[in-house]
Image (cartoon, rainbow, N blue to C red):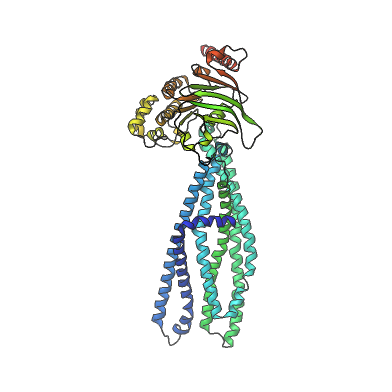
Amino acid sequence: MNEFRRLLGYARPFRGRLALAVLAMLVYAAGALGIVTLVQPIFDGVLTPTPTGVGWVAMLLLGAFALKGLGAYASSYLMTDVGQRVVMDLRNRLYRHILNQSAAFFSSRTSGQLVSRITNDVSQVQRAASETLADLIRESVTVVGFAAYLFVLDADLAIICVATVPLVVYPLVRLGQRVRSTTRRGQEEQEHITHVASEGLTGHRIVKAFGAESREADRFAAAGLSLFRTNMRITAAMSALPPLMEFIGGVAAASALWYASIKIGRGELTAGEFGAFLFAAFSLYAPIKKLSRVNAGIQQAIAAAQRIFEMLDTHSEVKERPGAQPLAPLQSTVEFRDVGFAYDDTPDRHILRHVSFTVRAGQIVALVGLSGAGKTTLVNLIPRFYDVTEGALLIDGVDVRETTLASLRGQIALVTQENVLFDDTIGSNIAYGAPGASRTLIEDAARAAHAHDFIMGIDGGYDARIGERGQRLSGGQRQRLAIARAILTNAPILVLDEATSALDSESEQAVQAALVNLMRDRTTFVIAHRLSTVRHADLIVALEDGQVAELGTHDSLIDRPGGVYARLHALQMLDERERQYEDTL
């Protein structure tokens, strides 16, 4: 129950509302008990040949029903309010926590899995927080009130009824354990079906291109069938207890009826007293039946909470050191000093080893090498998507690990091969890194990125929505919006990760013209697929197997015998000649 207690801890900020809800539950229980206590005067005073106190009994009965209804409404509303607030805080905290994790965290998990934790698992907890907890408190108070009244009416009959309670405890515990374990499997199946759906929908173009609609639909159906079977096992477990309790309650009622007939025959019990007792006993059944489902609901919430807290207890964040200071704007150099890097799960396999070079402010440095040489990993260290595991990365002589993340990342603009655009307006996407920017600044950035003309040709212009991941735009248009976003951010350090490699020749020319404007007066790190784009770089860093193989300019490296850069250049020249030859055929 540690997870359940931890879950209840999220209700502490709402103690006032929770106290009012409990008070309303006491009002509900008092009203329900008041209805039961009026049964005896109805039988013994009203339903007689000479009725007495009919008006008072009727008024009291109406008052008891009104009290019960008012308590039910207020307790249900207040508990739902508390539950929704708890779940909102939990969902927000979970989402923020996930966003703060390192790049390695996201590389080892799918977006469908993470979305499932935020939506499906939290929804499972929401039902428990809003409904189950309310039933637990309200029905428990009602059961205690009814049970006490039974003992007041006749202790012997009450003992006979209560004697059957232990028979319920064992199946209640066993079925609860089964519900918890099955619910966890159900949440995992729900996570899987979310993942399958997310893959199929985001990759719909590839699915259609390869005629794989039926295959993807079958994958989804298989995942759905597995989830169906798991949910039915949960339903079977939750549906088994109420009939069992009803049977045990029937045994108790039959025993009480037999014993009451003996006491009535002896004159030790009136018909009104027994009617009141029987009515109270049957009234006791409804809250007990609800409580049996409460246990199953709590077990479901615990299973979901375990998965949520597992995520909240996962810490792969790139953390700021105590006393970290804001980083001043770049003035002189960016230095890689004997940098090494390995992932946490493979500490013996270094992606980078002994990388050392210095870039002066305003220079353009090109990172080249074969696929897997470590180029992208190297530039990911600059904004601290990962931290170096050896050596240090220094900006103006300051180790970036000694600075605040906000001040560091505020100095870096990033343009990648596959830029992420959001389902928002064109203007909002350009101003993503500068949300307070005016329309004039947004348009100036778009003009500098050679994007203004095509934007004005779209219905709605800067107010047009571009769809998920900018799917309503071409690749070159998306890239120019990303460049405009980087220009508007006005960061002194720029990272270009193969920003033109996926574009056709015409789009590449437009993007290259935009990049010229973007790189002006900035310290730029360029990962280039085509070496022609780095010919004029101030410094070329040739990586091989995670190490710096060569440093220099294009002219100093191109004629170096057996050099890495010279080999890459020769291979690309050969590829270009082959493409030109194929184009002439």
Looking at the image, which is closer to me, 578 or 376? 376
Q: Tell me if 160 is positioned left or right of 138 in this view.
A: right
Residue 236, compared with residue 120, is above or below; it is below
Residue 225 in view:
yes
Location of residue 546 in the rendering, given as x and y in whole percent from the top left corner: 61, 26
Q: Where is residue 170 in the image (x, y as percent from the top left)?
A: 65, 64
Please give the name of the residue rendered at 56% of the width and 78% of the height, measured from the top-left corner: 151
Residue 372 in sight in this render: no
The correct choice, above or below, for 271 with respect to 520 in the image is: below
- In the picture, residue 164 is in which quadrant? bottom right
Residue at image coords 53%, 85%: 270
Picture quadrant of residue 350? top right
* Quadrant assignment for the N terminus: bottom right
Task: Compare residues 577 and 554 and report the one nearer the observer.
Answer: 554
Q: Is residue 84 above or below residue 427?
A: below
Relative image position of residue 344 (x, y in whole percent): 62, 37
In the image, what residue occupies the spot 61% across and 70% down? 165
Q: How many marks do you count on the picture?
A: 0
* Residue nearer the viewer, 501 or 516: 516
The picture places residue 196, in percent across and down from the top left corner, at 56, 40
**The furthest residue to the left:** 440
